[in-house]
């Protein structure tokens, strides 16, 4: 039984994180939410309901935003599923605080919405961090269990390329402990060919 609450925002290091949804189009075998109800000192990131944009913006007022470096859309779900809310919150954050904004995403946004949504990020989103996770479609399907099956991986790479003209910092991320050195090198090549950065993160 999941312990559910209404934790719409939380702090990780120097960032304010926004938890828009628990829905996700992946079921990654290494996902942090497999480890428990919460993380980063937060009791639970499972939501009893999804917040409106206004609720998130009101929740942000509890923080002295001058003490933080960025706002990050990242919780126990895929934030681009709630694209309209994400964009409305991002617009509100830019207008009120002029802060950098990052989206941590599985890269399925264009599959989810059936169109290229990357142009909507222009002027709002400063960083898009996309979980590449593996250098092959076959391994991605095994590791991430996407609802879109084999087409998901190609769509993730295509989404990164689509973001490049509109977002100044586009990053692929992979988890070091899930890949060999050869696979990490292959991921670097994919990132280079897509014109984006590669970030190798540690498994929590």
Image: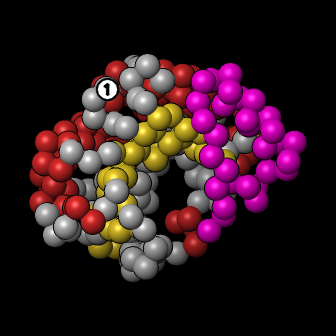
Residue appearing at x 12%, y 60% in the figure: 58
**Within 10 Å of the Cα at label 1, are there few (<14), some (14-19), or many (20+) other Cα atoms?**
few
* SS of the residue under disc 1: loop
User: Residue 3 appears at what percent x and percent y?
Assistant: 39, 77
Left or right of 16, for residue 59: left
User: Residue 125 appears at what percent x and percent y?
Assistant: 34, 36
Residue 124 appearing in the image: yes
Residue 77, above or below 25:
below
- How many marks the image carries: the answer is 1
User: Residue 181 appears at what percent x and percent y?
Assistant: 85, 48
Residue that mark 1 sits on: 122
Q: Nearer the viewer, residue 10 or 31?
A: 10
* Quadrant placement of the C terminus: bottom right
Residue 139, quarter of picture: top right
Q: Nearer the viewer, residue 70 or 177?
A: 70
Residue 199 is a magenta residue: yes
Instruction: Give the magenta-colored segment's residue range.
Output: 175-204
Residue 178, quarter of picture: bottom right
Residue 23, above or below 146:
below
* Quadrant placement of the N terminus: bottom left
Left or right of 94, for residue 18: right
Left or right of 58, for residue 148: right
- The colour scheme applied to this rendered structure is secondary structure
User: Residue 97 appears at what percent x and percent y?
Assistant: 18, 50
Residue 93, above or below 186:
below
Residue appearing at x 39%, y 45% in the figure: 102
Residue 146 appearing in the image: no
Residue 187 is a magenta residue: yes
Residue appearing at x 60%, y 36% in the figure: 197
Q: Residue furthest front?
A: 66
């Amino acid at each position: 039984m999941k312990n559910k609450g209404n934790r719409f925002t939380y702090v990780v290091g120097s960032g304010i994180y926004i938890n828009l949804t628990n829905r996700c189009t992946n079921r990654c075998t290494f996902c942090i939410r497999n480890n428990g109800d919460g993380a980063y000192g937060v009791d639970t990131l499972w939501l009893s309901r999804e917040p409106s944009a206004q609720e998130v913006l009101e929740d942000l007022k509890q923080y002295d935003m001058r003490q933080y470096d960025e706002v990050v859309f990242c919780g126990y779900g895929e934030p681009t599923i709630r694209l309209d809310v994400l964009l409305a919150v991002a617009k509100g954050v830019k207008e009120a605080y002029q802060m950098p904004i990052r989206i941590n995403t599985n890269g399925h946004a264009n599959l989810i919405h059936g169109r290229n949504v990357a142009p909507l990020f222009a002027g709002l989103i400063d960083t898009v961090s996309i979980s590449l996770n593996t250098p092959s479609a076959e391994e991605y399907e095994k590791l991430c269990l996407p609802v879109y099956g084999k087409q998901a991986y190609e769509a993730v790479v295509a989404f990164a390329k689509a973001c490049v003209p509109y977002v100044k910092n586009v990053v692929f991320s992979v988890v070091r402990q899930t890949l060999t050195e050869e696979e990490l090198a292959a991921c670097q090549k994919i990132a280079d060919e897509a014109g984006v950065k590669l970030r190798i993160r540690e498994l929590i």
